[in-house]
Image (tube, rainbow, N blue to C red):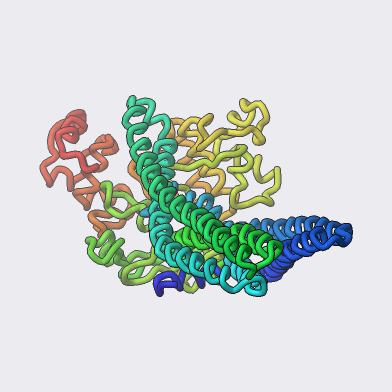
Amino acid sequence: MPSLARAPMRLLLGYLRPHHRGLAAGAGLMFVGGLVNLAQPLAVKRLLDGVTGGTSFAEPMLLLAALLVAGALIGAGGMYLLEATAESVVLDARRRLIDRLLRLRVGVMDRAEPGDLLSRVTGDTTQLRAAATTNIVDLVTGVFQIGGAIVLMARLDLVLLGVVALVLALLLGVTALLAGRIRDVSERTQAAVGRLGAVLERALGAFRTVKANGAERQQTATAHRAATQAWQHGRRAARWVSAAGVTTGLAVQLAFVIVLGVGGARVAAGDLTVSSLVAFLLYLFYLAGPVSQLAGGVTGLQTGLAAVGRIDAVVRLPAEDPDEQAEPNAEATQPVSVAFHGVSLRHRPEDPDVLTDVTLRIPATGLTALVGPSGAGKSTLLALVERFQDPTSGHVEVGDRDIRRWPLRELRARIGYVEQDAPVLFGTLRDNLLLGTPDASDDWIDDVLEQTMLTTLVRRLPQGVDTPIGHRGVTLSGGERQRVAIARALLRRPSLLLLDEPTSQLDAVNEQVLRDLTAHVARTTTVLMAAHRLSTVIEADRIVVLEAGRIRAVGTHQSLIDSDDLYRRLAQTQLLLGLEAPAAAVSNGYRGRPETWAADAGSLDDPW
């Protein structure tokens, strides 16, 4: 096998190793069944010799019948064991892929195509199924069965065996040439199917957006192009596989015709008995099965090697260390401080810095707000605290401890995190609420539902919290999904609460409720909030103004109004200046009557 195929072959054997007993038992039964089948032509020869010699043929007939039944039963048992082992191999491969996918680093998943990854869990593992068991067993048993048949054929007639050996050598040479082609087109086909899955996942993930923009034809055309590419590669694969199959069948037929001609001549010359010729022809017919097994095993193995290569590409993606997945400490609910020490971050070496030399200390308890224009780095700071990413330089501390020294599960067990788009999973409202706290009591759930003003929603749902809420929470409004995400975070009783734009989909009434709730939680918890709406954070204990990945200013709302131009512009744009113009605002040219300040602010460049 070429050197490039050795690594995938080792990977394939690695999947087989835990199941070697079942595989060996199945292969052993298949081999024994093949040996039983090898004895059948000899029984036929004995039967014919008995008929032509005038002796009783009852005993040879019973022996032949017993061999037929035994061969079928043993072969069926071996096939069952192989199929059962194949399912176990696929299960292990899928579990390994699932474990890896759910431990991938967030940055890796952000750049990946989910549809393609899903196709590797489903389609590629199915390709692995046959290759890891049936194809390998076909190769091994095919070789032994062909070898056994050749030994017995040699006892019957060496001349005819030479004819068969020449044809088989020709067949093996052609099959070896086709194997590389089959593997290449199989890999291309599987990659094309993965791209099709990625296209469909994108379209179905934004189904309403596609509908609202009348983009069905556009997305359909894109999916059709991907399907056509998969079809084209599939046709090429079918062409090479069928060529291998035709070559096998043609070789057996050619061998049969030549053996029949040469054997008939040898019978006529008296060098071979009729019974020996019939037995030899039966062995030739028998060889059709193992030869087809051998050719099919080679072609199928190439498809499996292509699949195992794609599976291994996922397994080798950067993932979080499983050793860091320690059990969370349920008692660790005390608020913790957060500190950034000279933190800089860039996503790739060739990219510019997203954060530059950020140094900031956030004490335990209280509300700290991160504000600034879009792209300033607010959400990125939250991602660093969760260790979704690691800094390019500098380090982050939680509770005066470098977060790289925290076991990930223990770190995240202390954190409640509300994402900007507040994703909701398919399932019931209870499933979503208890995503990170499956053992939460009903009383605690009711308390959090009341705090987040979700009790009205629960009463409205026909089955309360056990009501299915559809794919991505489609039956909920945007504000309800956001409140569900907040409730999910609070159910964890976090030491540190991270809020990424939690009011982006809340109306004024619910925004006020969230402000009150945040103020209440901040008394006993460290709260770090990224916000665009300054109205949400004007009462924050401290406000951090970010610009272009750097900390520009830190202070309270009023002190920043007085001292920082950018913050003042943000406040003016959102109509949050007081009735009296601050001295700094006047000194910077914002004069006139108070009722004109909002109009003046409207003429400013939009900082968002």
Q: How many marks?
A: 0
Name which quarter of the figure residue 532 lies in. top left
Q: Is residue 311 above or below residue 537?
A: below
Regarding residue 233, the answer to whether it shows in the image is yes
Q: Is residue 44 above or below residue 562?
A: below
Residue at 30% in and 48% down: 558
- Can you say which quadrant of the picture contains the C terminus? top left
Residue at 63% in and 64% down: 267
Which is nearer the eye, 570 or 79?
79
- Can you say which quadrant of the picture contains the N terminus? bottom left
Point out residue 596 in the picture as x, y percentages from the top left corner: 17, 30
Position of 297 compared to 378: left or right? right
Which is nearer the eye, 234 or 453?
234
Point out residue 13 in the picture as x, y percentages from the top left corner: 56, 70
Residue at 74% in and 65% down: 42
Point out residue 29 in the picture as x, y percentages from the top left corner: 73, 65
Name which quarter of the figure residue 37 lies in. bottom right
Q: Is residue 297 above or below residue 154?
A: above
Which is nearer the eye, 328 or 258?
258
Position of 479 compared to 40: left or right? left
Residue at the far front: name it.
Answer: 269
Residue at 78% in and 56% down: 68
Point out residue 120 in the picture as x, y percentages from the top left corner: 48, 53
Q: Is residue 571 above or below residue 249?
A: above
Which is nearer the eye, 443 or 293?
293
